Image: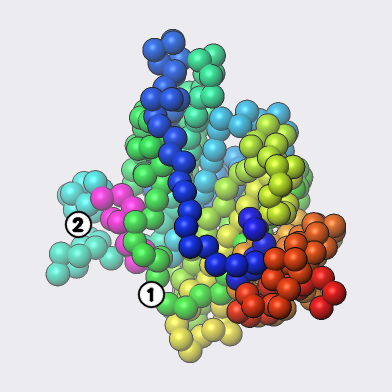
């Protein structure tokens, strides 16, 4: 069932949630440490994006990187409702930067960079490196905020959530890529990614991309051989690409009349990031449905599943759903023999 694609096998009517309690993972009474994190926000600047992505590349290229560390970088176009993300910033910004508040008292935000970094202990012996966090927090300039967090994961994960319903009230064209590359620095991925984002965010009042499109980008390191994402690859899940080092999502929201503009931007991204000359992944590794115009999963299964896994799912599908009852659209695993 897990990872079998939308609409497969059946309808879920009940599910059970297993809750992990903070007290079961609190090592301080045994002389250990509690989780530590940093949340930082910058005004958008291409150089800062490059520097942060270089840190992600370094993590991806270190196969022995401890799985305790996580780093996520987001880049958002102008007027993203940042106060949903960082409510405590409003009063501070109203005093320090009154120029961004209009006559109605509501802020009009420029493009932003948002970074989440965290460390989680898995034993009483685990210790984090403060210099790792300090280096991240000191990157770039025009920093708006940098909060250090020492609190249980149940609270810290709440700090990473975008509390608004969606980033922008527009349709969008999505791309989510996975990679197992350990040569992102050599392939100049940080700079090339920042340049692709900058084509939309660079302030040029005559640019249709700037005036009619908005980007929401989120890039996260998945870790190396120590990550649970990797070590759980053989636990029965049908999700693919478990050897991935980085996940990269680029969403281009667009005015209703400018869909082609967003599609063209994403088509160029495909050329820059994917393929033998791509700087991100030599293989096309997709994870989300609806990212591309062609919804025929069977015709494109190699971009979603490893060889053998898809064929296994086809047999499962044939047993569980022999009549194809649960096939709401072409993006579904094709039953074996059909």
Outermost residue toward the bottom? 257
The quadrant holding residue 320 is bottom right
Quadrant where the N terminus sits is: bottom right
- Residue 40 position in % (x across, y down): 40, 43
**Is tag 1's residue or tag 2's residue first in the polypeptide sequence?**
2
Instruction: Report the coloring of the rendering.
Output: rainbow
Q: In the image, is residue 245 above or below residue 44?
A: above
Q: Residue at x 80, y 59 (%)?
A: 312
Outermost residue toward the top? 31
Left or right of residue 208, residue 186 in this image: right
Left or right of residue 101, residue 316 in this image: right
Q: Which residue is drawn at 58% across and 85% down?
A: 260
- Residue 212 position in % (x across, y down): 45, 80
SS assignment at label 2: helix
Q: Residue at x 55, y 67 (%)?
A: 11
Task: Indicate whether residue 90 is drawn in magenta.
Answer: no
Q: Give the range drawn in magenta.
A: 79-87
Left or right of residue 94, residue 213 in this image: right
Numbered circles on residues, count: 2
Task: Give the labeled residue for mark 2.
Answer: 98
Query: In the image, which is nearer the foreground, mark 1 or mark 2?
Result: 1
Quadrant where the C terminus sits is: bottom right
**Do labels 1 and 2 touch, CB within 8 Å?**
no
- Residue 73 position in % (x across, y down): 51, 49
Q: Which mark is residue 169?
A: 1
Residue 124 visible? The answer is: yes
Q: In the image, is residue 275 above or below residue 116?
A: below
Could you say which is closer to the camera, residue 292 or residue 114?
A: 292
Residue 202 visible? The answer is: no
Q: Residue at x 79, y 76 (%)?
A: 299
- Residue 219 position in % (x across, y down): 57, 52
């Amino acid at each position: 069932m897990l990872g079998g694609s939308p609409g497969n096998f059946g309808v879920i009517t009940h599910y059970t949630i297993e809750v992990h309690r903070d007290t079961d993972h609190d090592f301080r009474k045994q002389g250990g440490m509690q989780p530590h994190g940093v949340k930082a926000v910058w005004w958008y600047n291409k150089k800062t994006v490059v520097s942060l992505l270089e840190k992600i590349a370094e993590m991806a290229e270190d196969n022995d990187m401890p799985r305790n560390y996580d780093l996520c970088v987001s880049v958002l176009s102008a007027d993203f409702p940042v106060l949903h993300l960082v409510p405590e910033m409003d009063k501070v910004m109203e005093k320090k930067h009154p120029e961004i508040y209009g006559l109605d008292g509501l802020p009009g935000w420029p493009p932003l960079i948002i970074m989440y970094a965290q460390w989680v202990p898995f034993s009483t012996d685990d210790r984090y490196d403060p210099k790792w966090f300090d280096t991240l927090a000191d990157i770039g300039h025009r920093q708006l905020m940098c909060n250090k967090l020492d609190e249980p994961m149940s609270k810290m994960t709440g700090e990473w959530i975008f509390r608004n319903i969606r980033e922008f009230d527009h349709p969008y064209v999505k791309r989510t890529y996975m990679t197992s590359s350990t040569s992102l620095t050599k392939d100049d991925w940080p700079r090339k990614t920042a340049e692709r984002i900058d084509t939309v965010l660079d302030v040029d009042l005559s640019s249709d991309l700037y005036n009619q499109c908005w980007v929401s980008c989120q890039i996260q390191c998945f870790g190396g051989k120590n990550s649970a994402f990797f070590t759980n690859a053989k636990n029965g899940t049908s999700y693919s690409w478990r050897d991935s080092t980085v996940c990269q999502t680029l969403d281009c929201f667009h005015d209703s009349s400018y869909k082609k503009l967003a599609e063209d931007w994403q088509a160029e991204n495909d050329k820059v990031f994917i393929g033998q000359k791509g700087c991100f992944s030599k293989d096309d590794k997709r994870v989300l449905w609806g990212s591309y115009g062609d919804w025929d999963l069977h015709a494109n299964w190699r971009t979603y599943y490893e060889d053998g896994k898809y064929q296994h799912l086809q047999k499962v599908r044939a047993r569980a759903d022999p009549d194809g009852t649960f096939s709401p659209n072409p993006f579904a695993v094709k039953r074996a023999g059909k």
